[in-house]
Each structure stands twice: as C-alpha cells, then as structure tokens.
Amino acid sequence: MSTRAVALLRRPGQPQRPSLLELFFDLVFVFALNRVSHRLVEDLTERRAVVAEVGETLLLLLAFMVLWFVTAWVTDLYDPQRLRLQLLVYAAMLGAMMMAVAVPHAFGDRALAFAGAYVAVHIVRGLVIVPGLRGHEAQRRAAGVFLWFTISAVPWIAGAIVSDPARGLLWTLAIGIDFAALLLFYPAPWTRPIQREWPVLAEYISERYRQFFIIALGELILTTGSAYSDTSFREGGAAAAFGVAFVTNILLFRVYLFKAGQLLPEAIRASDEPARLTREAFLAHVLMVAGIVAVAVGYEIVIDHPFGHTETAWVLVVLGGPTLFLAGRALVEHAVFNRVSRSRIIGALVLVGAAPVMLPLPPLAAAVTAVVVLGAIATSDTIRAWGRPPERPYPPRLHH
C-alpha cells in the first residue's frame, strides 16, 4: 500500500471538528448566497419572465451547494493538514468566488466564467486526489467521483458556449448529473455498489452541515440589514419589516437546532449506514438553505415595499421560503427520530393555505404571517420539551 496514499487520508484519532481552514472556505459562500439572492430580487422586482429567471437562479444555487458539499466531504475523507488538500480548498474558494462574481450575468456574457470555474474546481481536485491515492483501495472511490464530474463537464461547458434556451437545457442536464451521481455515491464499474465504502466522521460532517446552515442565516442578516440601511429610519413600514426579519432569523435558528439538529451527530454515529444518513441530511440542508435564501429575497422586497400592491411571486418567496425550510427540517427529524412532528406539517400547510389570502393584503402581512407560524412552531417545541427526558435518536434501521 502506498505511503503517500495513506498520508493523504485522515488518520484514526485525528480531531473530528472542522478547522479554521474550512471556516475560511465558508466565507466565500456568504458572498455567493448573497449574489444569488440579489439576482432573484432583481428578477422579481423588475417584472422579468419570472418562471424562467427563478429556474435559472435555482440552478445556480444548486451548483454552489454541490461544490460546497463535495468540498466538505473531501475534507472529511482526507487529511486537511496536508498541503495538497489545503491548496485544493483554496482552489475551491477561488472557483466559488469566480462563480459568485459571474452570478448576475451567468446566463449571459459570463456563462463561460461561471461554468468554467465550477468545472475547473472538480476536475483539478480529481487530477490531484486520484493519482495521489495510487495503490490504495480509496483510489477507486475517488476515480468514480472524477468520472462523473468529467461527464457533467461536457454539458456545463457546451451550455456556456451556446445561447438560450439550449444553455438552460444543457445546464439543467449537467446539474442533474451532478446531483444524481452524488446521491448514488458516484457509482462506477470499478466500485462496489455499497455505501459502506464511504467512511463518515459523524461529528465532523454534522458540524459542517450546521455551519452551512449558519452561513445561510448570515446571508439573511446581510441581505435584510443592507436593505434596511438603504431606507429612511423614519419609515415605519420598513422598520417593522426589518424587525420581523430579525425575529424570523432567530426563530429559524431555534427551530433548526431543536432536538434533531443537536442529535444529528449521534444519529449518524449510531447508524448502520452513516453515508445514507449523511445523504438524507444533505438533501434536508439543500431544502433548508434554499428556503432561507427565498426568505432573504422575500424580506428584502418587503423592507423595500412594505405596503401597497403585493405581487404573486412576492408571496411565493415570503411564505414559500419558510415552507421549504420546514420541509427540510422535517426530513432531518425523520432521519434522526424516524418521525415528523405535527407542528412542522401543520405549519407548512398553514403557510401554503395562507398564500392566496395574502394577495390583496400588503407585503408586510405575508411576512408577519410567516413569523407567527414559525413562532407557533418554536413555542410548540418548547412546550413539548418541558419536563420531558432528553430524546435519543431512533435505533438504526437495517437496509438490505
């Protein structure tokens, strides 16, 4: 077995908590998520082709999420103290930064910059890690990852060269390949069709998920704070909307952290297939982060336009954002406890049912509705936990 390959992998007994390197990497994604949300705000307030523009922005957001998750898994599997791994993280930072800069015109004259940066991060990573694992069985796994990103690189680059609508179709295919391969653990002819060959450090990967969630909340603070700073402090409607946005941020944090968010590391550690549970947690955080980005978009619009006519698209982001968050939060709860609290289901149904009612009301009313629902869920969580013994994750289920 190659000594160089062994040196690249994490060693037993190494610290399982993320280092400053990973936190440094995350800083880029505050900017990236802010660029994505700002792009969507412009789409929704300038009366463009909303459905097409929202679809494009969602695609860009998913590309950032894939890049973040794969980088997090790389620093989970391999030793981040090695210079090669640190250089790969810096390269991923640069790629994410270039992608974020290109976001406003990613479907225009900066398409090649966005797609080229995304593809380059994944290809360079494979060209470094796969040869570095020569002689070790982990090379098969790394080669499978490299294979799928090589395949998806074709529609990414081809889509950047052609114009719409072909670009949108090719990029949808590309992100579909990336997500499908990720969820299937990058199968290849030379890899075993089992998930156990993907080792997971429960404490590490859970902490990285929580940090990504905090990044999204940070973006919500940045977006709403920036929007309010551009208004006159004498405007009562903007001040009320800013207050609602701040309370919403606190409630999102509390609802996320309650029980399942705290016990996710223990659940992964106790699972017979930790990689499967990690995948479920990834999907859950995709939904929650997308929901928070939508909340940031909606609340920026509400701060700028607290009263007056309410557009349908505005209601969809103001109420749809918390609904997506609750769906993701329910998925985390199901993964940890094998059940979903009724408060999450009822809250999501109330938000969906309230959407048509909000159309004749001012935008601020939709934001108040969202914060009331989230507040009711947080209160329900507190009441249910009062005087009860701490819950434990559901016993691991055997999958055949």
Image (cartoon, rainbow, N blue to C red):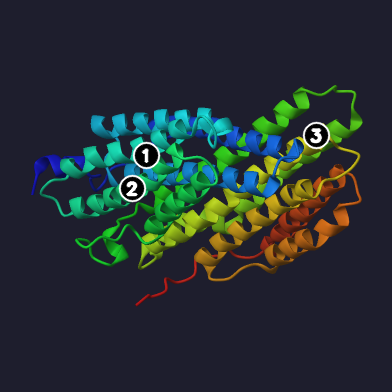
Position above or below: 397 against 22: below
* Residue 399 in view of the camera: yes
Name the one closer to the observer, 259 or 129: 129
Residue 393 point in image, percent of width and height: 49, 65
Question: Is 334 left, or right, of 374 in this rendering?
Answer: left
Q: Nearer the viewer, mark 1 or mark 3?
A: 1
Q: Are marks 3 and 2 in contact (CB under 8 Å)?
A: no
* Residue 390 in view of the camera: no
- SS for dot 1: helix
- SS for dot 2: helix
Residue 359 point in image, percent of width and height: 87, 52
Give, as a three-letter code, the residue at label 1. Answer: Val
Mark 3 is surrounded, within 10 Å at the Cα level, by few (under 14), some (14 to 19) or many (20 or more) other residues, namely many
Residue located beneath label 3 in the image: 303
Q: How many marks?
A: 3
Identified at 65% across, 53% down, the residue is 255
| Mark 1 or mark 3, earlier in chain | 1
- SS for dot 3: helix
Name the one closer to the observer, 184 or 158: 158
Residue 209 point in image, percent of width and height: 48, 47
Mark 2 is surrounded, within 10 Å at the Cα level, by few (under 14), some (14 to 19) or many (20 or more) other residues, namely many
Residue located beneath label 2 in the image: 149
Residue 71 point in image, percent of width and height: 38, 42
Identified at 81% across, 24% down, the residue is 231
Give, as a three-letter code, the residue at label 2. Answer: Phe
Q: Are marks 2 and 1 in contact (CB under 8 Å)?
A: yes
